[in-house]
Image (cartoon, rainbow, N blue to C red):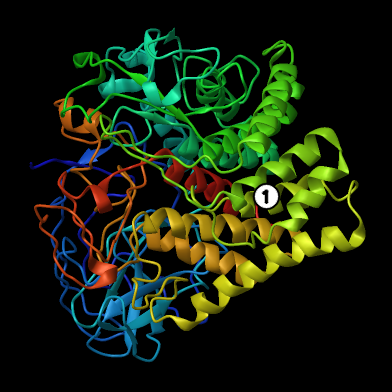
């Protein structure tokens, strides 16, 4: 399927560069100095800027002063890997190129091809995951706002990028707005959804209790109502386990950067109700989660059809939906989220009367069920064939929930339970959520905990961040991603894992400010937006080469050329598990990505990958 590219920064052609003939006062800079220019930031709209990937102007053929060379080729398949959206003015700015022709590169203004910066590539280094021998081009000293490109003596050029204090505004809005586009049980009218407007689907007011989910109060076939929530990924089902980490990360983003999100409006129906849009959006899913709790306190693992439906719009399928099996993992995820929601929404009692108290009780009921049923592991029923989110080790869920219950109630027994579990701090994911308990305790528990306990929590977070920094400094691409015999960091959802490393890095930075933490986070943002071995920006609608044929049913079935914007795709996955095989360009781990519908393991989207993207884009703009 040939599609146009919805972009935040257009791929424009660039000429070879010298001191401009019509601006003789412009001077060439060295790698340690940058010229001040008058270029203004132009924030392009994610919902309106549609260009062809081949859009380009011709080269002017000017001689390059000091950097050598005089020919520039098109950027459509550039070997220069760079953040295609841009950089904050004082951020570390790095591009990567494979086997440059010589040691020098330059930065030029996109508007007039005036060269404003010259520098030298780093020494060559090989990155095992991509099999490439590369050099880095650093231009951190260039801080003047504007739109630029990077070129070199070999006639190669990068996609254009911006430098500016607002460079991530559109992207941050789009990443949050993506949740609105994945709402279940809702019509998306054009005033909010633009060209991606669609009819409502899946009202979920006639959901059946599956045989695996029977309890003393609900028999097989009992009808319940569980509307709202988000479609989990590219399919139309809703899963509690994945909702847990997703909702938590959005609520944490608000708690940690409340001023930022108080001013971030993304044009949803609830906008302008005196509640930040991030909390309105999270509430859409929390209200679904409420209805997934059985009267006995246990929580259903998922709400699903028996099989995945075809590539149709939400309103074009009416297959019966079921709630399936109460599990310990789902119940503990629920308990943790409800405890956090009780705290957060207590400040919005007028908008959500009674919600805080209801969430507190729901959390207590869920915890009590999990204590009485500590090892109920999800087992896929024979007549169900949708996603499992199976988790055989629920110790980390107990740790996270215990931390949140301690903060909710102040009862020391919950803290002792947390301490008794060696969950450790890792980049969190749906099957490893213990880190979330550490973050909550560090943020809210200092006044409640002993100095030794608080130090234990913060040391764990800082130690994990230091580990990411060490990896960031060691790799040839300058990103905290590497491989081992099992694939290393390039597994299913590798982009989400990278974003969650940044989540931990930026929270550690709030505890112990470090330029290394900020630089490592910047490198992850750069990686996600184009400084990677595939050359793609991994966010739909962002950059000159974003994903187009994502594994997302509404984007596939809506007859709109551009996919829904703002979604982070899964990214390279070394195992390439699809059967029959998809068309992958390489078997190398870091290049194992395919922008095709077929590649659900690399090109699908999910709510849990977007959440850390929302977090880190807020965090990097508000870093101490």
Disc 1 crowd rating (10 Å Cα; few below 14, some 14-19, many 20+) is many
* Quarter of the image with the C terminus in it: bottom right
Residue under the point 60% across and 52% down: 396
Q: Is residue 257 left or right of residue 496?
A: right
Quadrant position of residue 371: top right
The foreground one among 84 and 305 is 305
Q: Position of residue 29 (x, y in %)?
A: 44, 79
Instruction: Inspect this view and state whether residue 66 appears.
Output: no
Helix, strand, or loop for circle 1? helix
Considering only vertical position in the picture, is 245 above or below 123? above
Of residues 335 and 467, the one nearer the viewer is 335
Where residue 422 appears, x then y in whole percent? Answer: 68, 62
Residue 33 vs residue 617, the one in the foreground: 617
Residue 564 shows in this picture: yes
Please identify the quarter of the rendering in which residue 324 is found: top left
Q: Is residue 64 left or right of residue 586?
A: right
């Amino acid at each position: 399927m040939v599609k146009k590219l919805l972009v935040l920064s257009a791929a424009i052609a660039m000429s070879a560069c010298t001191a401009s003939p019509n601006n003789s006062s412009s001077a060439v800079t060295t790698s340690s100095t940058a010229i001040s220019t008058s270029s203004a930031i132009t924030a392009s709209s994610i919902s309106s800027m549609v260009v062809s990937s081949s859009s380009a102007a011709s080269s002017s053929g000017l001689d390059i002063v000091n950097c050598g060379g005089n020919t520039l080729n098109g950027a459509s398949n550039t070997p220069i890997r760079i953040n295609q959206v841009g950089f904050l003015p004082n951020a570390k700015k790095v591009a990567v190129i494979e086997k440059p022709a010589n040691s020098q590169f330059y930065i030029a203004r996109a508007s007039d091809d005036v060269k404003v910066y010259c520098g030298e590539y780093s020494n060559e280094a090989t990155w095992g995951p991509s099999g490439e021998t590369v050099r880095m081009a650093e231009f951190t000293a260039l801080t003047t706002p504007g739109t630029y490109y990077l070129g070199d003596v070999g006639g190669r050029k990068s996609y254009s990028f911006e430098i500016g204090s607002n460079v991530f505004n559109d992207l941050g809005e789009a990443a949050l707005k993506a949740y609105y586009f994945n709402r279940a049980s809702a019509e998306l009218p054009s005033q909010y959804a633009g060209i991606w407007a669609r009819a409502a689907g899946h009202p979920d007011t006639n959901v059946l209790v599956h045989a695996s989910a029977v309890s003393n109060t609900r028999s097989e076939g009992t009808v319940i109502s569980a509307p709202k929530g988000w479609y989990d990924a590219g399919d139309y089902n809703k899963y509690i386990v994945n909702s847990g980490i997703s909702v938590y990360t959005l609520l944490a983003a608000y708690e940690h950067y409340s001023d930022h999100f108080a001013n971030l409006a993304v044009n949803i129906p609830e906008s302008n109700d005196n509640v930040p849009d991030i909390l309105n959006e999270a509430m859409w899913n929390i209200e679904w989660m409420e209805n997934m709790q059985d009267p006995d306190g246990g929580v259903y693992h998922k709400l699903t059809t028996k099989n995945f439906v075809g590539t149709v719009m939400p309103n074009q399928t009416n297959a019966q939906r079921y709630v399936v099996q109460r599990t310990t993992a789902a119940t503990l995820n629920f308990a943790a989220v409800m405890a956090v929601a009780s705290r957060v929404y207590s400040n919005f009692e007028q908008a959500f009367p009674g919600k805080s108290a209801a969430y507190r009780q729901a959390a207590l009921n869920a915890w009590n069920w999990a204590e009485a049923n500590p090892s109920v592991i999800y087992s896929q029923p024979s007549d169900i064939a949708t996603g499992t989110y199976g988790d055989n080790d629920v110790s980390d869920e107990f740790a996270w929930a215990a931390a949140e219950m301690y903060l909710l109630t102040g009862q020391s027994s919950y803290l002792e339970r947390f301490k008794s579990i060696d969950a450790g701090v890792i980049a969190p994911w749906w099957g490893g959520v213990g880190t979330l308990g550490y973050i909550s305790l560090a943020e809210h528990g200092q006044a409640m905990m002993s100095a030794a306990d608080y130090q234990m929590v913060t040391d764990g977070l800082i130690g994990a961040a230091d580990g990411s920094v060490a990896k960031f400094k060691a790799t040839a691409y300058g990103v905290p991603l590497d491989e081992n015999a099992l694939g290393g960091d390039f597994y299913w959802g590798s982009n989400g894992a990278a974003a969650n490393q940044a989540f931990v890095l930026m929270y550690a930075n709030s505890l112990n400010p470090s330029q290394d933490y900020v630089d490592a986070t910047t490198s992850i943002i750069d990686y996600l937006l184009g400084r990677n071995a595939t050359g793609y920006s991994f966010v739909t609608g962002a950059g000159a080469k974003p994903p187009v044929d994502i594994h997302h049913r509404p984007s596939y079935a809506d007859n709109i050329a551009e996919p829904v914007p703002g979604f982070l795709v899964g990214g390279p996955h070394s195992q390439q598990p699809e059967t029959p095989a998809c068309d992958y360009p390489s078997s190398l781990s870091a290049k194992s990505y395919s922008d095709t519908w077929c590649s659900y393991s690399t090109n699908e989207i999910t709510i849990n990958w977007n959440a850390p993207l929302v977090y880190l884009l807020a965090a990097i703009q508000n870093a101490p």
